Image: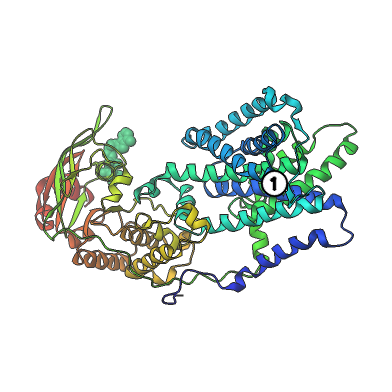
Amino acid sequence: MRAPDTPPSRPLLHHLPRVAAIGAIAIVPLVPGIPDFWITLAGYIGLSSLVAIGLVLLTGVGGMTSFGQAAFVGFGAYTTAVLTKDFGLSPWLTLPASLATTGAMALLIGAVTVRLSGHFLPLGTIAWGIAFFYLFGNVEALGRFDGINGIPPLDVFGTPLIDARAVFYPIWIAVILAVILSENLLDSRMGRAIRALRDGRLAAESFGIDTARVKLVVFVYAALLAGLSGWLYAHVQRAVSPSPFGLNAGIEYLLMAVLGGAGHVLGGVLGAGIVTLLKDQLQDVLPKLIGADGSFETIVFGILMVVVLQVARDGLWPLVMRLLPKAPPKTVAAGVPLPARTMPERGSPLLAVVNARKQFGGLVAVNDVSFKVKAGEIVGLIGPNGAGKSTTFNLLTGVLPATTGEITLSGERIERSSARAIARRGVARTFQHVKLARQMTVLENVALGAHLRGRAGVVAAMLRLDRADETRLLGEATRQLDRVGLGAHLHKPATSLALGQQRVAEIARALCLDPQLLLLDEPAAGLRFAEKQQLGALLARLRDEGVSILLVEHDMDFVMKLTDHIVVLDFGKKIAEGPPAAVAADPAVLEAYLGGVE
Ligand SMILES: Nc1ncnc2c1ncn2[C@@H]1O[C@H](COP(=O)(O)OP(=O)(O)OP(=O)(O)O)[C@@H](O)[C@H]1O
């Protein structure tokens, strides 16, 4: 659904349930007869929600599991405790200090932690979660394990906010702001980069996204929300000690995010609500049932976490969503087109590979291969299985550095450049095994390809100051989807498309980069005959429009009909090259490859 010249937006009606929910929260303390106890509990739900929302972005969306988030709550809490108690500062003045301390610690810890992969990352978070617990408990200035008491309450114009009804409002205003800012962030250029982290660093890097930086941004953002929660906690509780900032608390926060729905911002709030209420009830009931004192709720939480991961990986929020009115798809503006790259003159040298070599230990996968791609032509790179095509592709796209040899793009050496740097020079690619982000729509996936052509950063996104930039990026993605014939599928989940269409969507994503060279890795694999014909027509049209294409493909008929020039590899060596007809008749090729398949 497209409407010209309107920014990406959702009709006001869509916000109604959210506005109603916020309104309902605001009047909770005003309802006569609600005991203070429940208002206090609601305050604690709000405090936990802030941490859980951060974890939704970090773990649920960004794929980085953290058990150590409670430590950041501790940094926020201890900073304000020391500054207000020992230095007599006003709590409002210590808010920036609490956030700065937490942010600085997150930058430091994150710089090391987010580079860890697989199970090393959660293990790393457990390690610093424990380390900071003992740090808080052993520093004299922080009151050791006794902590700091007598922290002043927040105040408004000299009136202290002491009772549960009074502190309810600052807590829930913070939660509502966190929800809005986080949802805005996810619905943006940077948000798409964050959401792409989970399904593959390589695809994101190939479109110029600095994944290490994006991971650090999410890590710091989640920590800041935890720090804010800690700052509020210190002034609500008016005392801090290490135990609420230890590993147990970290596990509880993670459970909140997972149980609520780790991929959904409001799932964090739901999870915080459920776990806080459950904990309160279990702490009452379990000791009576078991007949002994102890934190038995931790055992229940452990079991609950395992059950949720087994039966409802997406948590409970998706179930709530089914009850809410379905959001209509965003309208996408035609917008002002993004500035286009000046294409090299047709026939001019574009890509030159000279004696490129790649060795894996004793195996020479690419053996001093040389070939050229001229601007405006389609070159096929073919060869039997194991011939070295994918490795050559990886050398050209910066996934692997060449052992020796030179690769130049428009006269600039790129054989040692990163995938990101190569993308910035206008080389876009598709993947042999389709790499689209599962939880994003076709439009959002394709817009990732235009990442480098946008400017808006995190703060602009959170404050919704990125709309002009966003309109241009989504407009470009829509144009490219129309160009490849997928204009009717903009708002579908990317993985709901047939495999052939997913391959074509990858081409649209690559076109969003405004490439001078398009590298296609087996684009016709899995396509039906008619789809192959359409793909062939599309690639021929792109060539006519000035795009140069290097094509790795097993379908000989497809390659022979489409390409201007073919390079044949076998056992890592170039055994032939030339126009399709000459290559097809080359005895070495027939022997090594074509002969082998007949
Ligand atoms: N990372 C790696 N480490 C060690 N050997 C590798 C690595 N990548 C590829 N190889 C080897 O290099 C050779 C060339 O592999 P490559 O994947 O480039 O061939 P290909 O022509 O793309 O094959 P296919 O058509 O099956 O994809 C193979 O013998 C392969 O086992």
Between residues 347 and 137, which one lies in front from this camera angle?
A: 137
Left or right for 72, reference 119: right
Q: Amino acid at mark 1?
A: Ser
Q: Is residue 216 left or right of residue 203?
A: right
The quarter of the picture showing ligand 1: top left
Asked if ligand 1 lies within 8 A of label 1, the reply is no
Residue 78 in percent (x, y) is at 67, 34
Front one among 93 and 109: 93
Q: Position of residue 353 (x, y in %)?
A: 16, 43
Q: Residue at x 46, y 53 (%)?
A: 190
Label 1: which residue? Answer: 48
Which residue is at the front of the view, 592 or 445? 445
Q: How many marks?
A: 1
SS of the residue at dot 1?
A: helix
Asked if residue 63 can be seen in this view, the reply is no
Is 115 on the left-hand or right-hand side of 21? left
- Using the rendered view, name the quadrant where residue 468 is placed: bottom left
Q: Is residue 81 above or below residue 341?
A: above
What residue appears at the point 48 percent right and 50 percent down from the top-left corner? 194
Q: Position of residue 539 (x, y in %)?
A: 25, 63
Quadrant of res 326: bottom right
Q: Residues within 10 Å of mark 1 (few under 14, many from 20)?
A: many
